[in-house]
């Protein structure tokens, strides 16, 4: 009898999407069929609500399939999902990357033979998953997970309890994977992790992220473009700054975990930087690399935030000249210190988030307009859409060679895209 291939639904971050690709491979190797897997996110209470909504919808659409819930929300709130009648199995973030988990699911002894919840203490995990995916992403860009977990305890964040403590992938393993990707024709690699700038702290001799970046660029000379995902600017090391200054193959686009623009709120968040630290970093990185662009995460409506505090976040966007904003309206996560602080009214949170997003849209338009007439190297993701080194989308009126880097002059702006 033919068995349908498993169906996967991913919620949340790029790392979750990466791990979904790993689970697809693990489940295929195990011969799993007739299964729906939901890889959840726990970053906000809204993310958990959406996960529950998605699970109910998927059960209606797949009444006879085995429904498995995994990911960060499954790790932090296993009972929430175990109590849902639609769910057959809840699997933790460590277990989802283990081949035996999928072999057990595929085995004839699965039904009723094991407990519904398979979620262990992730704080006891000391190694990154050994499962590396060669080529996840588009045909032009691949994502390489080099780190997982987080040792910091920001007062608003549940993620360390979903991902565990920080663990790094050894530099040699990363370099070997990137060499394979380049041999397969990938022109851009993105380094990704939960707390990327903590990479190396758990490895012998405690190397820094900048050491890894310089090693990749030296040992993989045929890699045209290296990109790093979200970083904590206060943890940036000297070698990473050196790479920004001297390595044109390191892309001039950094996404910064800033979270707020007011010192008092930053302290209540238990962040490790102050407002002036963020501004100084942005000024220095742009001095070293004038075409540098920044994205940033900013939370609106953190507990105790006043209008004056919020105004400092608005000003920070302009003082750091941030382009790509990820705005998060604050929502309390049970079990975090911030959930016990005096909360801002929901209406004010929505209004402040809307103001931040409007400013973000204005910043994007200013960036786009400044590119008109400039010549860019554009990595084609599809025949008529590519991205500049700053990760800006560019649309073309005629087909270009997919997955290749083309040189083109920017002619105009269409919505949030450049035209060339």
Image (tube, rainbow, N blue to C red):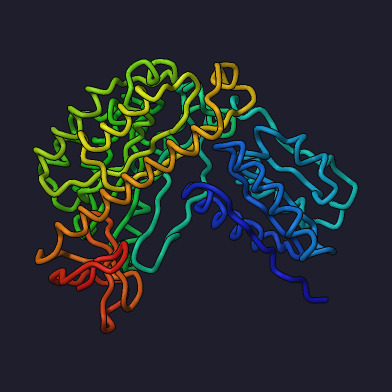
Can you say whether 90 is above or below 162 in the image?
Answer: below
Could you tell me which quadrant the C terminus lies in?
bottom left
> In the picture provided, is 143 more to the left or to the right than 48?
left
The answer to which quarter of the image holds residue 283 is top left
Residue at the spot 19% in from the left edge and 55% down from the top edge: 221
Can you say whether 123 is above or below 74 in the image?
Answer: above
Q: List x then y, in percent, for residue 398.
A: 26, 84
Q: List x then y, in percent, for residue 320.
A: 21, 35
Residue at the spot 49% in from the left edge and 47% down from the top edge: 13
> In the picture provided, is 306 more to the left or to the right than 42?
left
Could you tell me which quadrant the N terminus lies in?
bottom right
Q: List x then y, in percent, for residue 390.
A: 23, 54
The answer to which quarter of the image holds residue 182 is bottom left
Can you say whether 258 is above or below 48 in the image?
Answer: above
Q: Nearer the viewer, residue 193 or 390?
A: 390
Residue at the spot 22% in from the left edge and 69% down from the top edge: 405
Q: Nearer the viewer, residue 225 or 255?
A: 255
């Amino acid at each position: 009898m033919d068995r349908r291939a498993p169906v996967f639904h991913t919620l949340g971050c790029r790392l979750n999407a990466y791990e979904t690709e790993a689970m697809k491979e693990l489940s295929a190797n195990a011969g799993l069929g007739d299964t729906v897997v939901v890889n959840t996110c726990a970053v906000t209470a809204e993310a958990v609500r959406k996960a529950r909504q998605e699970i109910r919808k998927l059960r209606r659409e797949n009444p006879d399939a085995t429904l498995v819930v995994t990911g960060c929300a499954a790790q932090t709130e296993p009972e929430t999902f175990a109590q849902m009648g639609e769910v057959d199995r809840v699997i933790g973030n460590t277990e989802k990357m283990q081949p035996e988990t999928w072999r057990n699911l595929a085995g004839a002894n699965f039904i009723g033979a094991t407990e519904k919840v398979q979620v262990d203490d992730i704080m006891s995990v000391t190694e990154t998953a050994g499962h590396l995916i060669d080529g996840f992403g588009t045909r032009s860009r691949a994502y390489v997970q080099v780190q997982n977990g987080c040792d910091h305890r920001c007062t608003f964040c549940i993620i360390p309890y979903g991902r565990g403590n920080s663990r790094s992938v050894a530099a040699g393993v990363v370099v070997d994977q990137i060499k394979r990707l380049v041999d397969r024709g990938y022109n851009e690699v993105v380094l990704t992790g939960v707390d990327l700038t903590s990479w190396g702290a758990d490895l012998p001799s405690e190397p820094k992220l900048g050491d890894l970046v310089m090693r990749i660029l030296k040992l993989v000379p045929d890699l045209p473009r290296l990109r790093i995902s979200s970083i904590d600017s206060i943890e940036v090391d000297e070698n990473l700054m050196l790479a920004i200054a001297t390595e044109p193959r390191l892309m001039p686009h950094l996404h910064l975990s800033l979270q707020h623009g007011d010192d008092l709120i930053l302290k209540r968040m238990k962040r490790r930087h102050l407002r002036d630290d963020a501004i100084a970093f942005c000024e220095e990185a742009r001095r070293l690399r004038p075409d540098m662009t920044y994205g940033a995460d900013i939370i609106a409506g953190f507990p105790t935030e006043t209008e004056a505090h919020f105004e400092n976040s608005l000003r920070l966007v302009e003082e750091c000249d941030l382009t790509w904003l990820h705005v998060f309206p604050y929502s309390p996560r049970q079990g975090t210190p911030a959930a016990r602080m005096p909360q801002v009214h929901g209406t004010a949170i929505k209004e402040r988030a809307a103001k931040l997003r409007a400013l973000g849209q204005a910043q994007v338009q200013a960036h786009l307009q400044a590119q008109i007439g400039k010549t860019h190297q554009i990595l084609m993701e599809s025949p008529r859409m590519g991205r500049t080194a700053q990760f800006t989308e560019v649309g073309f009126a005629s087909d270009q060679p997919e997955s290749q880097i083309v040189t083109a002059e920017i002619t105009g702006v269409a919505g949030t895209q450049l035209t060339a």
